Image (cartoon, rainbow, N blue to C red):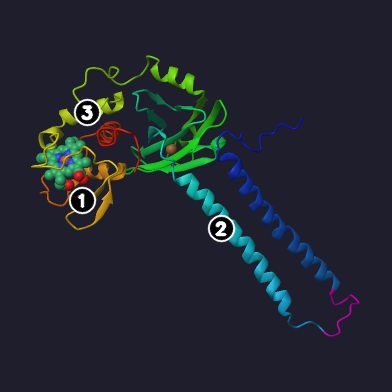
Amino acid sequence: MWDFPFFPEQASTFAQRVDLLYFVLVGLSLLFAGILPFVMLYLIVKYHRSMKANRQNPVNSSLSLELTWSIIPLVLALVVFFWSAWLYLDMTRPPPDTLEVYVIGKQWMWHAQHPSGKRENNELHVPVGQPVKLIMTSQDVIHSFYIPAFRVKQDVVPGRYTVMWFEATKEGEYHLFCAEYCGTEHSRMVGRVVAMSLADYQRWLTAETDVIGPAAAGQDTPVQLEPMALAGQQIFAQQGCASCHRLETNVRAPVLEKLYGSTVRLDTGETFIADENYIRQSILDPASQVVAGFEPIMPTYEDQLTEDQLLQLIAYIKAIGNPDGSTP
Ligand SMILES: [Cu+2]
């Protein structure tokens, strides 16, 4: 049997769709790159000086020929354009009910935090049959999160969050690569993705290793917080955020409840959707986006928070902002 792994397994809902488009593109390229040279060679030989050929009445122009070789490639190109745009939009717009996992790339490893508090390195556990959204950033240089079996790849950039989503269709272990050259040990920045049944995933989440803080219990907030948001709540208290951002009072600073996913108006008149990147910038560079009606008194927290802590803070602000877990 011929068992050379030309193609990675198809293990996500995107895999077949990406492969089909890919094969059609390869097919079209072969068609044009493969057939045209033979036609040229044939004509070169047929009409070579030394050949006896009928050279009477050469055709100088042919409208129907011109139309044919313009319209056919135009239609093909448009089909490829709309088809890939449709696929691209599906791949870049996560459905509303995703499971969120936070990923940090650093030289040279992948670190993941699940909202339930579970953390892992160079491994990513995900349930099968459930859309998963990764919110990713880098602590140093540009990396790229790549799972060939799922046909997904996304750059992971310092200073901002990028998002990627997928839905695994088959239980198993799959390669995880960094696909952006990021320094000497780039080639060893690899790991594995473990796709498991929902039940196994739940069991794995609650297994008692490498979990942040205690399980959610005895909170004074109206919403039940998951451990990652709970860790964020502690940072919120330790860093003195609460001294300005008190619950239900917006004298000195805006209320952060219901912020996530809402539309914010700045003093410049611009409006923004308060997503992860907006909140991140509000914390690291508050002066760059001052909320209308407030003084720019918030200090910057650049250099005071690790990427891990920032994500926990954001998880907290998200948790108090949208109890039903919807995304903007
Ligand atoms: Cu890397």
- Residue at (53% x, 49% y) in the render: 87
Residue 80 image offset from top left, x and y in percent: 59, 56
Question: Residue under circle 3?
Answer: 233
Against 143, residue 220 (above or below) is above
Query: Which stretch did the figure color magenta?
Result: 47-57
Q: Quick one: 147 or 24, which is closer to the camera?
A: 24
- Residue at (24% x, 41% y) in the render: 259
Give the residue type that dot 1 points to. Answer: Gln
How far apart are the two marked residues, 2 and 3, measured between alpha carbons? 46 Å
Q: Is residue 180 visible?
A: no
Question: In the visual, does 245 lie left or right of 47?
Answer: left
Label number found at residue 289 = 1
- Residue at (34% x, 19% y) in the render: 211
Against 19, residue 231 (above or below) is above
Task: Decide whether residue 55 is among the magenta residues.
Answer: yes
Q: Quick one: 177 or 13, which is closer to the camera?
A: 13
Query: Could you tell me which secondary element the residue under label 2 belongs to?
Result: helix
Of marks 2 and 3, which one's residue comes earlier in the chain?
A: 2
Magenta: main secondary structure equals loop
Question: Residue under circle 2?
Answer: 81
Which of the image's four quarters has the C terminus? top left
Q: Is residue 92 visible?
A: yes
Question: In the visual, does 9 lie left or right of 129?
Answer: right
Residue 115 image offset from top left, x and y in percent: 34, 28
Question: In the visual, does 137 lie left or right of 296?
Answer: right
Residue 307 image offset from top left, x and y in percent: 29, 34
Give the residue type that dot 3 points to. Answer: Gln
Of marks 1 and 2, which one's residue comes earlier in the chain?
A: 2
